[in-house]
Image (tube, rainbow, N blue to C red):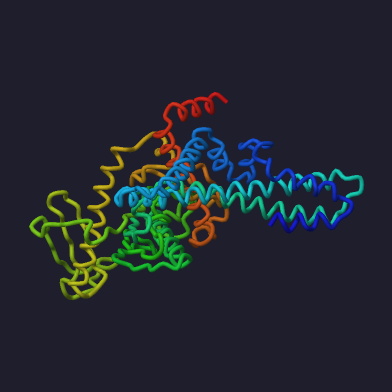
């Protein structure tokens, strides 16, 4: 990219001297400019990512990985390596390669941007300013800023440990909370259910309803769905928790008061385990069948097709009544039960390794209030990252607005995970960095 500009500069007699100077700066850029300055090139709304890359402990961690990559590459050139050692070093090189490639792409893009900015400054300061040249340079600067920003995020993603469940499908459940009258919670629960259905459509995921218990006035008591597609759990894993609504109800008993009501509903997100992950002894199960019920208590089935499965050792319950086939409902209920058992195991493991830093993003505990939807003020607020967005109706469609919020949550989560990883590698330096930041 920069070669295109260099050729262009050489064709312009007026700034020929500037172009000649620039060709000599390329090889000295990293010496002339501090690494911190190179990593400051991005938009303000991603300042947390840049702050992380400027962290001395993170820089040392990246440098250690690149040095290790060089050492491993040299070691593999040794013809006297045993076959087992060669396999070991080759595997390690494969693990380090994405980090090294991402880091080098970031450095090269930052160098290109630094060159363009230097030429732009020289052009602006020239006695006779070429407006067309300045406009072209600023377009190039904007493009490179965007590229550096994207590469910085890509670099952090290569450094963060991969969540083994990120690629999993999920069992997503919504359940209304309790408040006076109850209808505001039930209506909001239906709206949140519709929001996730819209998000699944936006992401081209499958959205299969397992259980749906409607309520009066068009509301919803509880629903469970299986969401399948690409990286579903990664996108939905931080949606679990308590969602709060503040609004003047339009229908139901609460609407008669014509005042702002507050209600809550619960979202539960469970990664769907592979068949080999959870082994259940049939002796530990109690399976009950009953007739499916719809809104108002009216029977919607004349046979005992609905299935409820209880895992006796833990007391965990799962049920399904969507199909008229008892066998199909039993199979679906078993999948939900396995997902809940898997989540129980994961919860215990997470509790053992939780740190104060992870609490900033949230533990995904189901009692944790994570987000507020204020319809009267047209505002959605995520309390974990102090994120606020307007146009609540557009947000509730489950499209780009929800995707943007989740992207910020994932970015924040990656940042915290990387800091924890760096602290484990450089505890003293990382602690000092944190102390210095607090002092500022």
Look at the image and tell me whether residue 415 can be seen. yes
Q: Considering only vertical position in the picture, is 327 above or below 135?
A: below
Q: In this view of the protein, which residue sits in the foreground, 389 or 246?
A: 389
User: Is residue 265 among what the camera can see?
Assistant: no
Query: In the picture, which quadrant includes the N terminus?
Result: bottom right
Percent from the top left, x then y, of residue 189? 39, 57
The answer to whether residue 108 is above or below residue 355 is below
- Residue 376, image x and y in percent? 54, 51
Q: Is residue 295 left or right of residue 7?
A: left
Seen from the viewer's position, the closer of residues 434 and 23 is 23
* Residue at 72% over, 55% down: 140
Report the residue at 53% width, 55% height from top: 392
Q: Quadrant of the C terminus?
A: top right
Query: Residue drawn 46% across and 51% down?
Result: 97
Position in image of residue 70 (x %, y %): 47, 44
Asked whether 178 or 230 is in front, the reply is 230
Residue 44 in picture, x, y percent from top left? 63, 44
**Closer-to-camera residue (382/430):** 430
Q: Is 252 left or right of 338, judged from the image as shown?
A: right
Q: Across the whole image, how many numbered discs are drawn on residues?
A: 0
* Residue most extreme to the front: 80
Q: Is residue 203 above or below residue 126?
A: below
Image point (22%, 52%), residue name: 341
Q: Residue furthest left?
A: 283
Furthest-right residue in this view: 128
């Amino acid at each position: 990219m920069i070669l295109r500009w260099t050729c262009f500069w050489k064709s312009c007699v007026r700034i020929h001297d500037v172009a000649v100077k620039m060709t000599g700066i390329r090889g000295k850029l990293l010496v002339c400019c501090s690494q911190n300055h190179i990593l400051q090139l991005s938009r303000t709304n991603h300042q947390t990512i840049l702050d992380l890359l400027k962290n001395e402990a993170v820089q040392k961690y990246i440098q250690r990985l690149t040095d290790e990559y060089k050492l491993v590459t040299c070691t593999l050139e040794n013809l006297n390596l045993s076959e087992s050692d060669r396999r070991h070093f080759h595997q390690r090189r494969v693990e380090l390669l994405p980090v090294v490639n991402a880091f080098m792409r970031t450095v090269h893009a930052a160098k290109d941007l630094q060159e363009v900015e230097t030429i732009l400054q020289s052009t602006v300061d020239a006695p006779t300013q070429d407006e067309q040249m300045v406009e072209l340079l600023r377009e190039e600067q904007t493009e490179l800023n965007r590229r550096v920003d994207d590469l910085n995020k890509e670099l952090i993603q290569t450094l963060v440990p991969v969540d083994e469940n990120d690629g999993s499908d999920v069992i997503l459940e919504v359940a209304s909370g309790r408040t006076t009258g109850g209808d505001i919670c039930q209506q909001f629960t239906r709206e949140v259910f519709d929001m996730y259905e819209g998000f699944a459509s936006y992401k081209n995921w499958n959205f299969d309803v397992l259980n749906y218990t409607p309520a009066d006035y068009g509301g919803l008591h509880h629903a469970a769905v299986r969401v399948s597609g690409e990286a579903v759990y990664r996108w939905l894993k931080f949606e679990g928790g308590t969602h709060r609504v503040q609004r003047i109800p339009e229908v139901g008993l609460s609407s008669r008061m014509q005042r702002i009501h507050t209600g809550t509903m619960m979202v539960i997100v469970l990664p769907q385990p592979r068949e080999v992950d959870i082994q259940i002894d049939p002796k530990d199960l109690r399976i009950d069948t009953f007739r499916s019920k719809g809104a108002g208590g009216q029977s919607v089935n004349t046979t005992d097709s609905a299935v409820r499965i209880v895992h006796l050792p833990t007391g965990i319950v799962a049920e399904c009544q969507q199909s008229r086939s008892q066998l199909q409902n039993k199979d679906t209920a078993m999948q939900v039960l396995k997902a809940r058992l898997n989540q129980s195991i994961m919860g215990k493991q997470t509790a053992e390794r939780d740190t104060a830093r992870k609490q900033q993003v949230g533990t995904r505990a189901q009692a944790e209030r994570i987000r507020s939807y204020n319809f009267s003020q047209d505002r959605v607020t995520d309390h974990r990252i102090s994120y606020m967005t307007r146009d609540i109706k557009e947000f509730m469609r489950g499209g780009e607005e929800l995707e943007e919020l989740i992207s910020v949550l994932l970015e924040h989560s990656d940042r915290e995970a990387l800091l924890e990883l760096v602290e484990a590698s450089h505890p003293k330096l990382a602690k000092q960095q944190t102390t210095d930041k607090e002092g500022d």
